[in-house]
Image (cartoon, coloured by chain):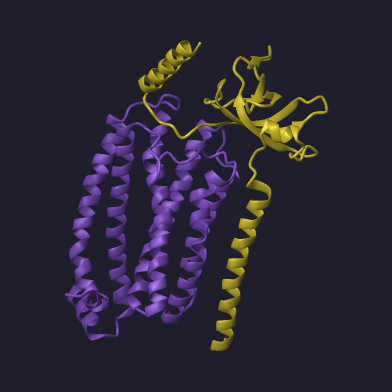
Chain colours: A purple, B yellow
Amino acid sequence: MNLYYYASPATFYPLAGKLIPWFAGLAVVLGAIGLYISFFIAPTDFQQGEGYRIIFIHVPAAWMSMFIYLVMAFWSAIGLAFNTRLSFLIARALAPTGAMFTFIALWTGAFWGKPMWGTWWVWDARLTSELILLFLYVGYMALQAAIDAPRRADRAGALLNLVGVINIPIIYFSVKWWNTLHQGSSVSLTGAPSMAMIMLWGMLVMALAAWMYTIAVSLARSRILILERERQTEWARAQLEGQA
Amino acid sequence: MKPRHRKLALIAAVVAALGLAVVLVLNAFNSNLVFFFSPTQVANGEAPTARAFRIGGLVEEGSIKREKDGLTTRFVVTDTARTIPVIYTGILPDLFKEGKGVVAEGRLGSDGLFAASQVLAKHDENYMPPEAAHAIEQAQKAQQTVVE
């Protein structure tokens, strides 16, 4: 077995079909565990009371919004470099989920900001750069939808995707580089987390559930994109007829 | 539309989108990256005192005084080096407390009193149960007694 084997849409299609139920199942199980920890096991916070529990949705969504964009950029770069069709399709399949998580991060952030900070929205560096990320996702999808020639749509989207990557470190480090209303990171790769262990666990399990959900949904979406793109080939026709 | 024109239109659209993104970023850099100024920065004349701006710091311990009308509050913002007295009329966020972070937007009067039009609470990135917070407080107090 080699990796090139699965780089062909015709072989990736059935593989993705087999994997989807597993990732979907994991997403449900982890989501249930994560929500249980978030609502019933994690203790009340010393300064924010029960309101802090929105963190269990907000932070995983914000992590995913940035991480999905990086994964898309990776596949876009591979696609541009090696001209592999599947890479572009995977980037494309990820975009709506990334946009959704960005929206959730902004939305729950507003809901959290009103009671804690006293405002729905401020134009500080963290919030503004996350909003720009949402525009980048929407721009990527709009650009691809606007171009009829599939190959050209792939390349244009990939280019926009790669240019937008500059925004990710800006989002991540914004709370360090500038004075922002948004507080610093509670969890980082280098330092010890500044939250109680069980709260951290709740957040990490929720993040894992979000990962599994993202993989399941984008695999399903990439299968549809593959069929749409390969509809003139024999195997895709056979697939479509088999379903009909 | 000819293919050539389509291509041109596409490039123009991409350039426009990128341009808009850059403009937004730069705009954010200009006016909003410095979301607030500390009392020391204000004292050094770094803040644009001619127009409305934001100050940030901690609410000084024992400085919160409520006026009789029940809505107006006076407090002092400190960065431990310099302080600025603030007056504000309106509803304060729940997390507004002495010794905690605050960001106030308003104008600096000639008398040095900062008249705020909006007061926001800035909390830190620490999350823990109240018992843990209490334990830390006790430990700090114990340490202070030892030092004294």
Residue B58, compared with residue A108, is above or below; it is above
User: Image point 54% across, 48% down: which residue?
Assistant: A174
Q: Residue furthest right?
A: B110
User: Image point 52% across, 25% down: which residue?
Assistant: B94
Residue A50, compared with residue A110, is above or below; it is above
The x, y position of residue A83, in whole percent, is 38, 80
Callout count: 0
- Tell me, yes or no, if residue A108 can be seen here: yes
| Corner quadrant of residue B71 | top right
- Tell me, yes or no, if residue A100 can be seen here: no
| Corner quadrant of residue A38 | top left
A44 sits to left or right of A149: left
Q: B1 or A142: which is nearer to us?
A: A142
| Corner quadrant of residue B58 | top right
User: Image point 49% across, 72% down: which residue?
Assistant: A159
User: Image point 19% across, 81% down: which residue?
Assistant: A238
Residue B61, compared with residue A109, is above or below; it is above
The x, y position of residue B15, in whole percent, is 60, 72
The x, y position of residue A214, in whole percent, is 32, 56
- The quadrant of the rendering that contains the N terminus of chain A is bottom left
Residue B30, compared with residue B102, is above or below; it is below
Q: B37 or B96: which is nearer to us?
A: B37
Q: A70 or A111: which is nearer to us?
A: A70
The x, y position of residue A112, in whole percent, is 47, 36
- The quadrant of the rendering that contains the C terminus of chain A is bottom left
B147 sits to left or right of A234: right
